Image (cartoon, coloured by chain):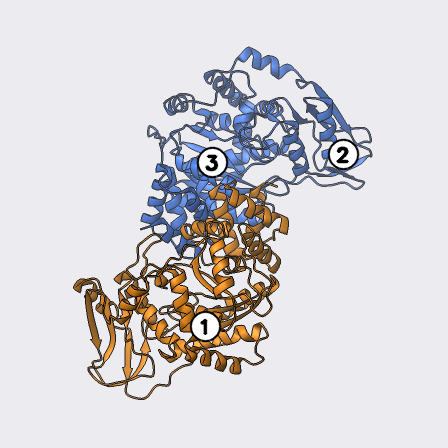
Chain colours: A orange, B blue
């Protein structure tokens, strides 16, 4: 069957058979389809959508387009992972992966780089001196089997269909299709050979999904499809109106993650890390009740064991531990540090994560386009949160910049990010559903 | 502005500015836009549509992407043309162009080739020995200024934007966009430098537009836009459920066209030719009333003058007049001729032009894909029409084929094309609106 027939069928609202979708993915990977036909097809999918069967077949065919990780059977050590749709200051993966390993899970955490205003786990990890995220699948398997955790980038042999399709979607306006997003996210996670998966779907001003309705639809779509594909999955919708935690920027987020691993750090970060870990305990039958499981996870963080797992992971993945420790002790690394102070006393009622995210990217912590090099040291810390009380002159945020000019630009970009009011404001729970 | 922004804006239902559309056409012709981006944009246009301003700007920018014909001012000899959306047996252009020239118009008729089940004027003309449809624009101008008519293919220098976009639409499922169809048709006609244009929008089983509502929408869209672009235009919706006339196939249609130019031939063909000629007389102020103008056109056909114009045109465009006359005198040219006879007596109530068109293409008269060579001699003649009375054993259609096998295939393909009933059936007028 000619691919043009499939484009026309999808354009007219029809569905493709499993054979047709598998053939599509096979030919995409083989480079056998003209790019102009694939992009027209993707745009038709964006408008017409895919049904459950099409979405499932696409996801599985993309997963199977490359290597799928396999694990020694061990019911006491389930293989699990987490995925987040991304937010400003979202460093959850960094404390979560060692916490999960410390709780007895095996965690082959394959992450991505930042694009847009949301940071990427790989960029954050690479701010650690010597740390390598490019490991072979053999080495990933070895580390996860022995130590319980590896935090790495995708290998070239995994999910090539997604790499090809994503690169095309990126230049043809076909990224924001819920069906294609779902297949892209899950094909990569399913290629890790997971037994359970927890999803953090961000919702709010700085999230890909701005409204609660959109985020809930995506969460349900991801959760439903992953379960159909045989991986026990739970999706949470969480707030992304203000940054998560009190710092944003690659190295600055490592610092905050280590605080979390020490049982300290911001409450919202700890809350979310423990919620996701607790959910995986419930999902794999290691706990009956989410609230109790969250308590176990919090106790585990306080024990210091996850911090030890973290440090061993850094060593195994090549970190220069002396340089890392020295870097961790330095309060300031960027050439220019400036504080923004509150003009008034009152209670913080808004911290706009989108404005901060855009300023962060401009500072050099993120990418304006794929391939840009990120600056590990720039960013924000000491960011106030909604519900904080401030006096006039208190620090609202501290800016770490490459130059005075860059700092001034950031200050003007975030001028409207903070709002202070007289009456008290309640803190909001991170978790929405 | 990056083209990706325009794709995204159109995808989200927005409109492009005139500058943006002109830039798009310029870059398409310069080959400066990646094909995958252009096809994604065209698919977004198919789903979202274009507003009046976008459609007008696109049409004019496409017209101006190449050479536009210019004419010596002469109010007594308006420059006019006709376009049809195509049908089975639609040979109207062949008698119409010389008739219009005979009526005093200048007619630079630039036509296309057949694709799908509808024939192309160029394919029909090229069944005339020696006749050339590839003339330079200088030669076209000379013939039209002196003799009043030339029937040719597009020159390489005219409307390159349409050639590029059409080739891309053809392989990406983006042909059936009313906006893109409108711009494609009119950009080519406007490049002829016309003062008036008449449009024949076919409607029915064998037409691109199956329903009257669709045909009417396309007719209104074409008429409205052409008038906005400064060319006085009228669109007629006409029936394409049964073939037009009694023959279909390249040379067989030339034979019937010559009959029409002799004042004879099928009534429906003569009716449509005279209607379109009459309309152009009204549109250019040479007649007040369509009915009277149709009478003038019919009288002109009967005068023999249009036939003389036709013969002079054949000579000027290189036809071998002796070979043409000999060919015209032969009743049968294809190696195999078979008659299909009526199994019963009664009145013809259906002749399915789609089935006949598909069989015609399979016989070799049309193309299964662009670039196929057409067979000039094969086809159908002596086709009965709705309203004809037949006795059992009367010929329903005569098949001209390359081989016995091909004839048998055609017979089985058209087995259900004809329906005969006992009670009488009225003939239907060709013109719907």
Residue appearing at x 36%, y 79% in the figure? A264
| Near-viewer residue (A159 or B113) | A159
Residue under circle 2?
B389
Q: Residue furthest top?
A: B322
Image position of A376 (left or right of A30): left
> Which marked residue is nearer to the observer: mark 1 or mark 2?
1
Indicate the position of residue A406 as horizontal and vertical percent values: 21, 63
Image position of B159 (left or right of B246): left
SS for tag 2?
A: strand
Residue under circle 1?
A99
SS for tag 3?
A: helix
Against B93, residue A103 (above or below) is: below
Image position of A44 (left or right of B396): left
Same subunit, tags 1 and 3 = no
Q: Mark 2 lies on which chain?
A: B
Indicate the position of residue A240 as horizontal and vertical percent values: 40, 72
Mark closest to the chain's N terminus, 3 or 2: 3
Against B245, residue A306 (above or below) is: below
- Classify mark 3: residues with Cα within 10 Å, few (<14), some (14-19) or many (20+): many
Against A79, residue A48 (above or below) is: above
Q: Residue furthest left?
A: A404
Disc 1 from disc 2: Cα separation: 89 Å
Indicate the position of residue B18 as horizontal and vertical percent values: 33, 49
Q: Residue B280 carries which label?
A: 3
Q: Which chain carries label 3?
A: B
Mark 1 and mark 2 residues within 8 Å of each other at the beta carbon: no
């Amino acid at each position: 069957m000619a691919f043009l027939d499939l484009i026309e069928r999808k354009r007219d609202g029809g569905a493709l058979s499993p054979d047709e979708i598998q053939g599509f993915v096979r030919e995409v990977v083989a480079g056998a389809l003209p790019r102009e036909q694939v992009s027209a097809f993707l745009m038709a999918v964006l408008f017409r959508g895919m049904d459950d069967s099409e979405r499932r077949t696409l996801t599985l065919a993309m997963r199977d387009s490359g290597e799928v990780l396999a694990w020694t059977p061990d019911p006491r050590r389930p293989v699990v992972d987490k995925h987040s749709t991304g937010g400003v200051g979202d460093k959850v993966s960094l404390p979560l992966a060692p916490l999960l390993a410390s709780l007895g899970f095996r965690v082959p955490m394959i992450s991505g780089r930042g694009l847009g205003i949301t940071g990427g786990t790989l960029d954050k990890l690479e701010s650690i001196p010597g740390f390598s995220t490019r490991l072979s699948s053999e080495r990933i398997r070895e580390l996860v089997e022995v130590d319980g955790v590896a935090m790495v980038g995708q290998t070239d042999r995994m999910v090539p269909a997604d790499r090809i399709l994503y690169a095309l979607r990126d230049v043809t306006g076909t990224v924001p299709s819920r069906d294609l997003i779902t297949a892209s996210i899950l094909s990569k996670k399913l290629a890790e050979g997971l037994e359970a998966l927890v999803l953090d779907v961000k919702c709010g001003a700085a999230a890909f999904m701005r409204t609660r309705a959109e985020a809930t639809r995506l969460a349900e779509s991801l959760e439903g499809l992953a379960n159909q594909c045989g991986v026990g999955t739970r999706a949470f919708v969480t707030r992304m109106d203000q940054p998560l935690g009190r710092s944003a920027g690659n190295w600055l987020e490592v610092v905050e993650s280590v605080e979390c691993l020490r049982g300290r750090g911001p409450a919202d970060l700890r809350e979310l890390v423990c919620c996701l870990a607790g959910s995986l305990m419930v999902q794999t039958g290691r706990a009956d009740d989410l609230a109790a499981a969250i308590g176990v996870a919090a106790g585990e963080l306080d024990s210091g064991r996850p911090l030890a797992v973290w440090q061993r992971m850094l060593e195994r993945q090549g970190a220069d531990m002396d340089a890392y420790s020295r870097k961790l002790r330095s309060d300031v690394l960027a050439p220019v540090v400036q504080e923004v102070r509150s003009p008034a006393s009152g209670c913080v009622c808004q911290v706009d994560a989108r404005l901060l995210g855009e300023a962060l990217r401009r500072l050099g912590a993120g990418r304006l386009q794929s391939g840009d090099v990120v600056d590990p040291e720039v960013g924000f810390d000491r960011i106030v949160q909604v519900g904080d009380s401030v006096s006039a002159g208190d620090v609202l945020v501290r800016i770490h910049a490459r130059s005075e000019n860059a700092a001034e630009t950031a200050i003007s970009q975030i001028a409207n990010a903070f709002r202070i009011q007289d009456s008290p404001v309640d803190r909001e729970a991170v978790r929405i559903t």
